[in-house]
Image: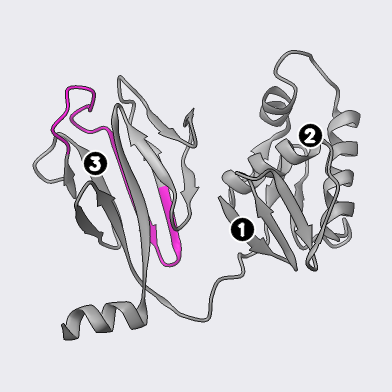
Amino acid sequence: MRLCFHQCVLDTERRSLTRGGGAVPLSPKAFRLLEVLVERRPSAVPSRELRELVWPDSPVGGTTLARLVNEVRAAIGDDARPPRVIRTVQRFGYAFAAPPEGSSAEVAAYRLVLDNREVTLHPGENLLGRVKDGVVWIESRTASRRHARILVEGSQVVLEDLGSKNGTFLRGQRIVAPILLADGDVFRLGSVSMKLRAVQSDEATDTAGG
């Protein structure tokens, strides 16, 4: 995933963070913290869950987590008072609050790419699985009847597992809560992979005209 925000570019595949065009050093734990907050944006993530994800093998206290948040804020040029990127949710946790810096072209629609076909997502709920009223019928025993759903709300596309037996995976990890999707994200329902594609206004016009 590649996300532009607040004069920064986060590339999770290359494990890099740049600010104003220059590389920004970030410790592995701080990078993981930023990665989790970005993946779960705009939802707030509980401090307890953040500690479990960043330090899976050892318990840490709230002071250590707060120091890590300060390291991330310093790296991306954020200020705790008031925060523009990392928002503190009192007595709960933290949230990634900066809107992504997209291209000048407006997104006209979102589509799912499966093998050699594309399916247009409609606003609101889009069911995925072996169900007749779903936006995608998945011919696989690894898919549950109501496996997952995608919610399209304006510029936000949210993927949510619906208690499937074989799980829904994004970036190699099984999702346990609703999570935002970005253009180009590849996710998997059981053993079936698909990709989200954002269709720009000019592309949609060309397609309609052709």
Q: Does the magenta stretch include residue 95?
A: no
Furthest toward the left, the residue is 132
Query: How many numbered circles are shown?
Result: 3
Q: Label 1 vs label 3: CA separation?
A: 26 Å
Above or below, comparing residue 176 to residue 13 in the picture: above
Taking the image as shown, residue 210 lies to the left or right of residue 97, namely left
Q: Which amino acid does label 1 sit on?
A: Leu
- For disc 2, the neighbor class at 10 Å (few under 14, some 14 to 19, many from 20) is few
Q: Is residue 153 magenta?
A: yes
Look at 67% across and 57% down and name the residue there: 97
Q: Which amino acid does label 3 sit on?
A: Leu
Please provide percent x and percent y for residue 138. 17, 36
Q: Which amino acid does label 2 sit on?
A: Pro
Residue that badge 1 annotates: 3
Describe the element under mark 1 as helix, strand or loop. strand
Above or below, comparing residue 188 to residue 94 in the picture: above
Taking the image as shown, residue 105 lies to the left or right of residue 121, namely right
Look at 73% across and 32% down and name the residue there: 47
Colour logic: one colour
Residue that badge 2 annotates: 28
Please provide percent x and percent y for residue 140. 17, 28
Q: Label 3 vs label 2: CA separation?
A: 35 Å
Above or below, comparing residue 37 to residue 203 in the picture: above
Taking the image as shown, residue 73 lies to the left or right of residue 144, namely right
Q: Give the range drawn in magenta.
A: 138-158
- Occupied quadrant, residue 161: top left
Look at the numbered discs 1 and 3 and tell me whether their residues touch, using CB distance below 8 Å. Answer: no
